[in-house]
Image (cartoon, rainbow, N blue to C red):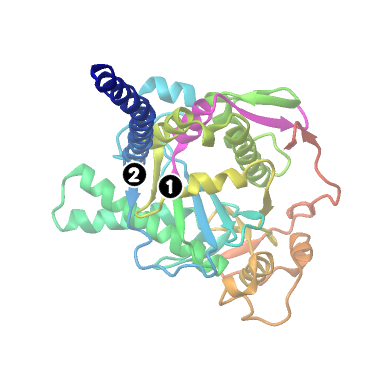
Amino acid sequence: MSAHRRKPTTRSRRHPARRRHPARRRRLGRTLLVTGCALVALTGGGAWYLYRDLAAGIGSSKALEGAEKSKFGDSNILLMGLDSRRDQNGEKLPEDVLDKLHAGSSDIGGYNANTLILLHVPGDGGRAKAFSVPRDDFVDIPGHGKDKIKKAYGLAKEKKQEQLAARGVKDVRQLEREGREAGRAAQIETVRNFLGVPIDHFAELNLAGFYHLADALGGVPVCLNKAVKDTYSGADFPAGPQTLDGRQSLAFVRQRHGLDRGDLDRTKRQQAFLAGATKKLNSVGTFTDPAKLMKLIDAAKQDVVTDEGWDLLAFAKQAKNLSGGKVQFTTLPIEGFGRNHGEDINVVDDMKIKRLIAEQIGPEASADAGASGATSSPSASLSASPSASPSPSPSTSPSSSPDAAPPPPSPSAPKEGGGIPCVD
């Protein structure tokens, strides 16, 4: 009997042991799974908040507050490059930085928007298009009259600061901050009226920004049709494809002396720089490498101002699709050259510009595009003869020199160096 009593006892010890073993493994598995999910959540959350912190450090502006927005999910982004040797607070840049920029003293160079590019990103995922606005286009500037389009920013900034000073404001940073806000709003309104399309976002960059952007990317690839050397900008480059560091990049986008078409060729340089930068962004995996992306955003904090509420992280993901030659660049046409109060200007046909923009990005994007008679194709607009230029204002005299108008663009495709268009 005792043997029979001991036998069940032995079985009762062993059987539960066999049942508890898989249960223990399941509990361990659940623990590891929960722990792993928590680590992933903490890591992802930490990266997200770090991105947010970095993005929050980029200068923010209310210049677009209440502005009309594009339809159908499209985005029009205005890129503004200022010819300023000062930081966001109006303080002089350090001398060592100025030496690297090869741009002279902080006391020269005002607040002209020497780079104006409208980037159109379709909501349907189609090909993005970038339109360069030549800085000397003679246009209507709200509250000022006709002048070079680049001046809208500086004129409004100066006017606002004078108004504040007349009211007794003496704080230098307040004067700079509010003056710049007025400048941004005026420049955006001027471009919006000239092109006839809404502007959804903008990014403002000063001279040092080109330098820091190129350095953050580890250099920007470009390609030149011929060797150049210019003491004004510091450009000294051989022909062919090459990678430029920060100092060289700034010289590349600033050069106009020694170029056949001056400012118009410089506009091509700016487009080539952006094409090279977007290619480099994609090739080095910046958007898939958090460390590289954070380094880029950190560099942007020094020199970039964007509109308040622009989700830069969402745009960074979208920007992956803008690289690899997927942006079509166009320089808006001019009718010829002229003079206004002793300054060289570009004579332009406002309605032709609006029609061209509407044809390129869709008529729904421009309420003013069809306001005038017959439309013209983009190719016809780009090769317009100066003899078709509109009558200038009384204070404007168009140049009668036979070489005053730029030559029409070559019908042949530009040469490329490693996937980057070669420019003069």
- Residue assigned mark 2: 59
Crowding around mark 2 (Cα neighbors within 10 Å: few <14, some 14 to 19, many 20+) is some
- Residue 218 rendering spot, x and y as whole percentages: 55, 24
Q: Is residue 258 above or below residue 67?
A: above
Q: Is residue 216 above or below residue 134?
A: above
SS for callout 1: helix
Magenta region = 204-226
Residue 198 can be seen in this image: yes
Seen from this angle, which residue lies furthest right? 412
- Residue 340 rendering spot, x and y as whole percentages: 55, 59
Q: Which residue sits at x=35%, y=37%?
A: 41
Q: Amino acid at mark 1?
A: Leu
Q: Is residue 82 above or below residue 194?
A: above
Q: Nearer the viewer, mark 2 or mark 1?
A: 1
Cα separation, mark 2 vs mark 1, equals: 12 Å
Q: Nearer the viewer, residue 32 or 341?
A: 32
Crowding around mark 1 (Cα neighbors within 10 Å: few <14, some 14 to 19, many 20+) is some
CB-based contact (under 8 Å), mark 2 and mark 1? no
Image quadrant where one finds the C terminus: top right
- Residue assigned mark 1: 312
Q: Which residue sits at x=51%, y=55%?
A: 77
- Residue 323 rendering spot, x and y as whole percentages: 63, 42
Q: Amino acid at mark 2?
A: Gly
Q: Nearer the viewer, residue 260 or 362?
A: 362
- Residue 347 rendering spot, x and y as whole percentages: 64, 62
